[in-house]
Image (cartoon, grey):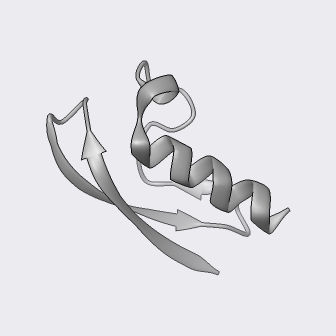
Amino acid sequence: MEEFVSGYCRVLDAARTVLVDLEEGFADCCYPDCAYTGECPIAAKLAALLAEHE
């Protein structure tokens, strides 16, 4: 199952839409290795979606 998550990305300094494959645990951004993961609204949504899917 795939989901789209939108929000502000500090790496790009712009809005970003990220594709998430919940079954693979894959996102088309640097999550979870991004330097801004702790303060990223997209990363928070990704973590919640992935945890919910487990």
Percent coordinates x, y for residue 16 in the rendering: 25, 54
Residue 13 placement, left or right of 34:
left
Image point 51% across, 38% down: which residue? 31
Residue 19 visible in the current orientation:
yes
Residue at 18% x, 36% y: name it.
Answer: 12
Image height of 35 relative to 9, above or below: above
Q: Quadrant of the N terminus?
A: bottom right
Q: Is residue 31 left or right of residue 1?
A: left
Task: Give the left or right position of residue 15, taking residue 42 as reference.
Answer: left
Q: Residue at x 54, y 44 (%)?
A: 44
Q: Residue furthest top?
A: 35
Q: Tell me where residue 9 appears, x and y as whole percent.
A: 27, 40
Pinpoint residue 42: horizontal percent, then vertical percent: 42, 48
| Residue sitting nearer the eye, 10 or 41 | 41
Q: Nearer the viewer, residue 9 or 24?
A: 9
Nearest to the observer: residue 5 or residue 34: 5
Residue drawn at 25 percent across, 30 percent down: 11
Considering every residue shown, the one lying at the far bottom of the view is 1
Residue 35, position as x, y percentages in the image: 43, 18
The quarter of the picture where residue 8 lies is top left
**From what the image shows, is residue 30 above or below residue 18?**
above
- Where is 32 relative to 49, above or below? above
In the picture, which quadrant includes the C terminus? bottom right
